[in-house]
Amino acid sequence: MRVTQQDIARLANVSQATVSRVLSGDARVETDIKDRVLAVISETNYQIDVRARSLRSKRTGLIGLVVKRPPGGLNDDPFFANLISHIMDFLAGRPYHLCVEMVSSASSQEAVYDELLRTRRVDGLILVESEARDERILRLQAEGFPFVLIGNPVEERESTIWSVDNDNVLAAKTATEHLREAGYQRVGLLAGPKGITVSDDRIEGYRQGMSGSDCDDLVWHCDFGFIAARDTASDILRSPSRPDALLVLDDFMAMGVVLAARGQGLFIPEDLGVASFNDSSLCDLFERGLTSVSLNIPQIVRTACGRLLKIIEEKPIYGPRRMIIPTELCVRGSTTRRDL
Amino acid sequence: MRVTQQDIARLANVSQATVSRVLSGDARVETDIKDRVLAVISETNYQIDVRARSLRSKRTGLIGLVVKRPPGGLNDDPFFANLISHIMDFLAGRPYHLCVEMVSSASSQEAVYDELLRTRRVDGLILVESEARDERILRLQAEGFPFVLIGNPVEERESTIWSVDNDNVLAAKTATEHLREAGYQRVGLLAGPKGITVSDDRIEGYRQGMSGSDCDDLVWHCDFGFIAARDTASDILRSPSRPDALLVLDDFMAMGVVLAARGQGLFIPEDLGVASFNDSSLCDLFERGLTSVSLNIPQIVRTACGRLLKIIEEKPIYGPRRMIIPTELCVRGSTTRRDL
DNA sequence: TTGAAAGCGTTACCAG
DNA sequence: CTGGTAACGCTTTCAA
């Protein structure tokens, strides 16, 4: 049988309420009583029952993260591994735990959000990879549920949504300009699924970076992941409108591009320049290094989680709702032609 | 204000107990009453409060996974991304969620396990990367807490521990023999931290595979992760006892070895053969492909999670407690010398 | 400062 | 088949 506060109370000759007070660090408990209770607690190895506490206090101590990928689609994807890793780092030592959920379709995603917030399984949510008109956001706002968006809320007015983001337009513009300056003429963009805001922002930045060029608008869409990118890149590289450089939505997809190029006997960076986003350690795995934009994920996560906990704990918050984390272009061999 | 079963009961003109029965799919409820209740439930958008349910039913619907890594140490590591991904795949659609925890030290690990199981935050645990004498296992067993080990329980007697594992001795032996057959003379092993059972088993297999060779026992230990492996490999490759082939504990670490070799101007597979474990998609990122042993992670996870849920739900279980998932050696360019 | 007691929203037992 | 009711273990208010 589990030890309860009731048991502690009996053993320490106090009321169960007092035990609760001691546990919650209530100041108005006589020191000797407190010591007596604490002694019994440590003797009995008592641990609070979080389920009962949750019911009473309306707090579960759980933060939720929902990822939308096809089954197995997270495999080896460094972005989520990083994200999850940094979130756990942040939460370690705090009274919060991370609950991760994967959904495969938009409809199941909404069902999961519904479940997650209506059932009060988690105290708050971190949203990633949002879409321009994100059902999740509307729903969470309507319910007044604590959440922080990692990404662009895409709102006309002054934002009412807490969000942490990079300036993806600027980052993509800078990366595109870097490719042009490196001597590539036909710079293309391998974007993500249509409607994903981070992808849309980078398309915008790419177009800004291409202004003044007589090159067509070379934008392709593609699902997340290594395999999808490889297959799409194979088609792109065989097409008549073949680009001589590709800016890719993330490193993992860029690795698909590298494989596709290799498969067609194209050399990087001579025949094809490649740059991408995230600056994960995959960049060092490509022989000559992969040029990539660092998003500063640790800082994104710290900012987002910190803010989320404040919202949950209803602490006063100062500063803007939309927080921008700076990016940095890390130039490596995949855009450094030696033939020029 | 949240909608409760009490509210539903009032609106449907039944007792709250009946609402509970309808929700739990109790057969003995008149069809028309049931329909009335269900109608109100869908009208009101009612969702059960999992906290109250947890308190009553003693089930949280949460499965725990605790990972021991230094802060940021999970970054880009495909093994955990895969593991988490497959666990989520398995859990999707079932009434269970995944709770992930990261700890940085042994002592914090024990504290976390204590917290996790004593507070009944999760219904069961999946253990990975166990050590020969694993405190976690002893503790969980003593408490009668449901858990499944992914790895080797290392017990003398008939095992009392549910575990899912590969035959790592055999797998390492096979991989070592493959390297020798490929023409390498001085085959070494880059193992993981000392005491980790999966690492120990592979050391044993390596030694079996090297029997009959006049080569020294070339085993090095190294922390998990890309960076640690790169640094250790740099030392190894510079040492007088330099091997001409390395079997590496996992792909991610193997990538560190690839980088170290590249940094010293060594060619793979000509100057150094490299083989590893996990067969993640990283293997295709190396120019000529990385030879790797597939652990069949999806099957490991399916087996482990399936078993864990059965234990939690106290369903009858047949078959052995220790379940072995077959491995497969996937030969690629990193062990295929063209100079022979 | 301490104790008694009222819930929190369920589940499940026991009558009817 | 249905309703009443007692827990589940805790937090918090209200009296003492």
Image: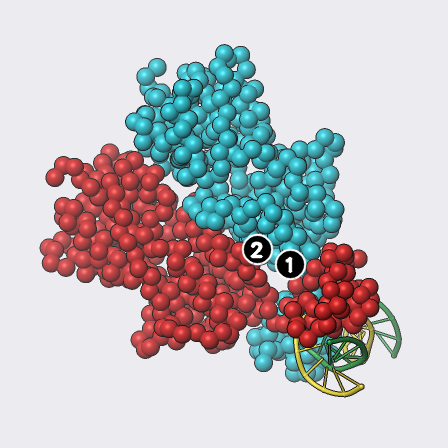
Chain colours: A red, B cyan, C green, D yellow
In the image, taking residue A256 as reference, residue B233 lies left or right, namely right
Counting residues from the start of the chain, the first of labels 1 and 2 encountered is 2
Residue flagged by tag 1: what amino acid is it? Arg
The answer to which of B199 and A130 lies nearer the viewer is B199
Q: Is residue B215 above or below residue B53?
A: above
x, y (%) of residue B270?
34, 21
Task: Name the residue at 30% across, 35% down.
Answer: A287
Question: Residue drawn at (64%, 55%), measured in percent from left and top?
Answer: B116
Residue at screen point 58% across, 42% down: B128
Quarter of the figure that contains the N terminus of chain A: bottom right
Specify whether residue B182 is in view.
no
Residue A118 as seen in the image, left or right of residue B258:
right
Position of residue B253 measured from the top left corner of the image (x, y, whole percent): 44, 35
Spatial CA span between label 1 and label 2: 9 Å
Please give the name of the residue rendered at 70% of the width and 33% of the height, measured from the top-left corner: B155
Image quadrant where residue B326 sits:
top right
Q: Of the residues shown, which amino acid type is indicated by label 2? A: Cys
Q: Which residue is mark 2?
A: B99
Which chain does tag 1 point to? B
Residue placed most toward the observer, A289 or A184: A289
- Label placed on residue B319: none
Badge 1 vs badge 2, beta-carbon distance below 8 Å: yes
Q: Is residue B32 above or below residue B218?
A: below
